[in-house]
């Protein structure tokens, strides 16, 4: 696999990481601004427990659905990156 393709994969990975961080930042702002304790708990639960995060996404929560889609896309890109990166770096990717 060419070095250029690895660079493109790295750029895609970085972009998705930025998008996930933006959604996390939006959640933080939401938690600071809302006074509804049920809504706060809903957002906090998704941030603390993977199972609740997935459940909320499957139930159609837009915020968690968007974030979960990005997480799955990031996982696939990381697999592609690991499959195409030099063998001496493969052990690092297994730690992720």
Image (cartoon, rainbow, N blue to C red):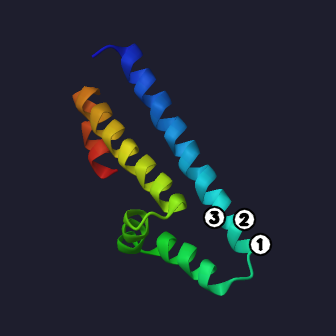
Please state if 34 lies on the left or on the right of 15 as rendered: right
Secondary structure of the residue carrying tag 2 is: helix
Query: Which of 70 and 8 lies nearest the eye of the viewer?
Result: 70
Residue 68, percent across and down?
42, 55
Circles 2 and 3 in contact, beta carbons < 8 Å: yes
On residue 64, the disc is none
Q: Is residue 70 above or below residue 15?
A: below
- Earlier residue among tags 3 and 1: 3
Give the residue pinned by disc 2: 29
Secondary structure of the residue carrying tag 3 is: helix
Give the residue pinned by disc 1: 33
Name the image quarter holding residue 78. Answer: top left
Secondary structure of the residue carrying tag 1 is: helix
Crowd tier of the residue under label 2, counting other residues whose Cα lies within 10 Å: few below 14, some 14–19, many 20 or above: few
On residue 27, the disc is 3
**Which residue is located at x 28 percent, y 39 percent?**
79
**Location of the N terminus (image quadrant):** top left
**Which residue is located at x 60 percent, y 59 percent?**
24
Query: Which of 62 and 2 lies nearest the eye of the viewer?
Result: 62
Please state if 3 lies on the left or on the right of 19 as rendered: left
Residue at the limit of the structure toward the bottom, as seen here: 37
**Which residue is located at x 40 percent, y 43 percent?**
74
Residue 4, percent across and down?
41, 14
Crowd tier of the residue under label 1, counting other residues whose Cα lies within 10 Å: few below 14, some 14–19, many 20 or above: few
CA separation in Å, label 1 and label 2? 6 Å
Residue 15, percent across and down?
54, 36
CA separation in Å, label 2 and label 3? 5 Å
């Amino acid at each position: 696999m060419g070095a250029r393709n690895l660079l493109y994969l790295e750029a895609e990975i970085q972009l998705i990481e930025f998008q996930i961080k933006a959604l996390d930042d939006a959640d933080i702002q939401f938690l600071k601004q809302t006074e509804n304790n049920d809504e706060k708990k809903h957002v906090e639960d998704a941030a603390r427990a993977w199972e609740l995060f997935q459940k909320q996404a499957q139930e159609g929560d837009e915020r968690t659905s968007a974030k979960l889609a990005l997480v799955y896309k990031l996982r696939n890109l990381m697999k592609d990156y690991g499959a195409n990166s030099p063998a001496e770096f493969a052990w690092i990717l297994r730690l992720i």
